[in-house]
Image: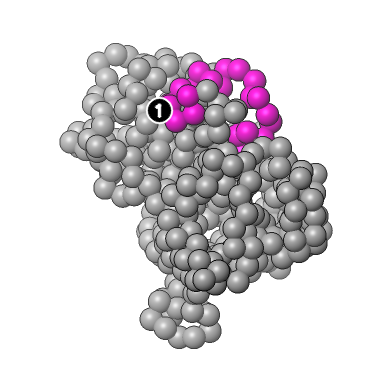
Amino acid sequence: MKAIQAFSNLTEFMSEPLQFMQNIAGEKVHTVRMGPKRFVFVFDPERAQEILIKRSDVYVQNRTVFDRIQPVTGKKGLVQLAGKESQEGRLKSRSMFNSAGLADARTIIESYCDDFLNKVEGHSSIDVTEEMMSLILQTALTIFLGIRSPELAEQIGKKFLRLNHLCGLRMRALVPVPLAIPTFKNREIKNLQKEIRDLITKHLNKNAGVPKAFDADENMIDHCMTFLFAGHETTAASLAFTFLLLARHPQYQEFIANGDEEMTLAIYKESLRLFPPAYMLAREATRDDDLLGIPVMKSDQVIIGITELHRHSDYFERPDDFYPERFHNKLKHPLAFIPFGAGGKSCVGERLAYFEAAIVLKKVCERFRIVESSATIQSEPLITLHPLAQQDLQLLRRKGDFHASP
């Protein structure tokens, strides 16, 4: 009976991970047998801090998860690295997000955003998920790879989005078929991966030194794959969620349109709190440990449930409400809000994500009022949490005369 229940738990978690975690989140820690392994689910910031920062050497990347997304990140891309390799790669990447790098990125983001605004003006409605994916992928291709060719961007973009979706399905599969076995989907994954890498390699051969931070790095193509994945999908998803929330709470659009930077940041953070693209962080215990009173055994699968942690009533009043003003005050715990992770494996593109989101939100809200068309916000957890397609919004041209700050 125990084996049947363990398999049932695993099936439930893999098919509906968010619902499964919501069902067990009444406890700050929940231990359960799933399949052949023991899982420890963590929903409180104190233990998250132990796992991600204080004892990160004990709780390492969960290879079961990261191996399944290798086709989209590259085997040696930054997100896959550990130890010294990870530290060196993260140090290199910081130069891409310094003040000079962000100044260059601003020009790129504003240009593409203006093109997007001109394209959608006059449309009765837009699919906000599709439009944000397209917009942010274009900015990522130019910021990270210097690709300014619409044709090449479209080629890589379509292939990359399809590959990303297929790898997301692999991550949620109970027992994914090894890629070495030539099933129809496995062949599609390998073909897409090769085609994208070939396009990137051809482009880099013509444009030596792009991106400069990883010039001459033997894993350049893998890093490029990682930057495309981390540099567009999470930002695009979070922006789509933000616009969907703004349509339901239109009073907040005025703060953004009038250039209130503090409130704009708070609005974006509140969207990240309610719909964190990185909805869980997966680790594995390298030895037996006592996690603040909870026994953890070597090889236990440790899952930090970010969505439920962000909605914990001990740390957020009215946790399920959209209330950006909460971010005007200091958090009750520094790790109560971790949409980009924390510690040595936190997202290196966090600064760029906030920077890009502020520009896009301001430009859109300056020109348009956003009106909801869809009834509810629908999301899907694959590699990351993202809003489902075909959730339409209306963009109504403002009569007021808003101008972007210089």
In the figure, residue 36 lies in which quadrant? Answer: bottom right
Above or below, 15 against 354 in this view is below
User: x, y percentage for residue 74?
Assistant: 60, 66
Q: Residue at x 60, y 28 (%)?
A: 315
User: x, y percentage for residue 62?
Assistant: 65, 62
Q: Residue at x 34, y 49 (%)?
A: 388
Q: Could you tell me how many numbered marks the image carries?
A: 1
Above or below, 163 against 327 in this view is below
**Extreme residue in the front direction:** 1
- The residue carrying pointer 1 sits among few (fewer than 14), some (14 to 19) or many (20 or more) residues within 10 Å by Cα, namely many
Pointer 1 residue = 363
User: x, y percentage for residue 126?
Assistant: 25, 40
| Residue 80 appearing in the image | no
Q: Which residues are magenta?
A: 318-339
**Extreme residue in the bottom direction:** 181
SS of the residue under disc 1: helix
Q: Residue at x 31, y 28 (%)?
A: 247
Whether the magenta-drawn stretch holds residue 329 is answered as yes
Above or below, 135 against 328 in this view is below
Q: Residue at x 38, y 61 (%)?
A: 158
